[in-house]
Image (tube, rainbow, N blue to C red):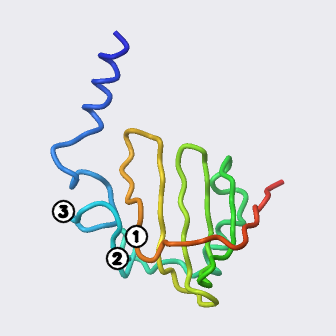
Amino acid sequence: MRSIFFALALSLSCGDSEDECDSILPPGAPRGHQDLPSTDDEGNPWPTYSEATADLEDCTRDEGYRRFRGTCSDGKRFLSRDGGYTGNTRYYGGEGEALVGFDSFSDVILECVDPSVGDSRCERTSIEEILCP
């Protein structure tokens, strides 16, 4: 009986095509590593490093998520949220403010995720957890 419910849940989560996923990528774009679009899925500019840091440090948002910031060996900086079942990391170019890439993960069957967009390669050289009271 459990296997029937699992099969039903899986079939409900899968559509006829990948285009049915809510994605920042244009319809029909292949999943996997992609170039970073010039704007987010609502047509807004990507947040700068300073804006994203302020958002990450706002403990009233995304309660229950662990929050991290750090640097990569190639000079990029990163900001990360980890909710256990879902999360993302955004990468910013060196000392610059511009977003250069991000990656996401999810254990939730019903969620579509673009796992790697833009320059999201990073050998982490430092990491700091941002603690909320």
- Of 123 and 24, nearer the camera is 123
* Residue placed furthest toward the right: 133
Decide: is 83 above or below 70: above
The answer to whether marks 2 and 1 mark residues whose Cβ atoms lie closer than 8 Å is yes
In the rendered structure, which disc, 2 or 1, sits on the residue that comes first in sequence? Answer: 2
Give amino acid for label 1: Val
How far is the residue under mark 1 from the one under mark 3?
Answer: 15 Å
Q: Residues within 10 Å of mark 1 (few under 14, many from 20)?
A: many
Q: Position of residue 45 (x, y in %)?
A: 44, 81
Q: For mark 1, what is the residue?
A: 117
The residue lying at 37 percent from left, 70 percent from top is 42
Q: Residue 28 — which label? A: 3
The residue lying at 69 percent from left, 73 percent from top is 125
* 32 sits left or right of 95 in the view: left
* Label 2 SS: loop
How far is the residue under mark 2 from the one under mark 3?
Answer: 14 Å
For residue 44, what is the image quadrant? bottom left
* 1 sits left or right of 87 in the view: left
Q: Position of residue 11 (x, y in %)?
A: 25, 31
Q: For mark 2, what is the residue?
A: 35
Pick the quarter of the image with the C terminus. bottom right
For residue 110, what is the image quadrant? top left
Q: Position of residue 8 (x, y in %)?
A: 28, 24
Give amino acid for label 2: Asp
Decide: is 81 above or below 84: below
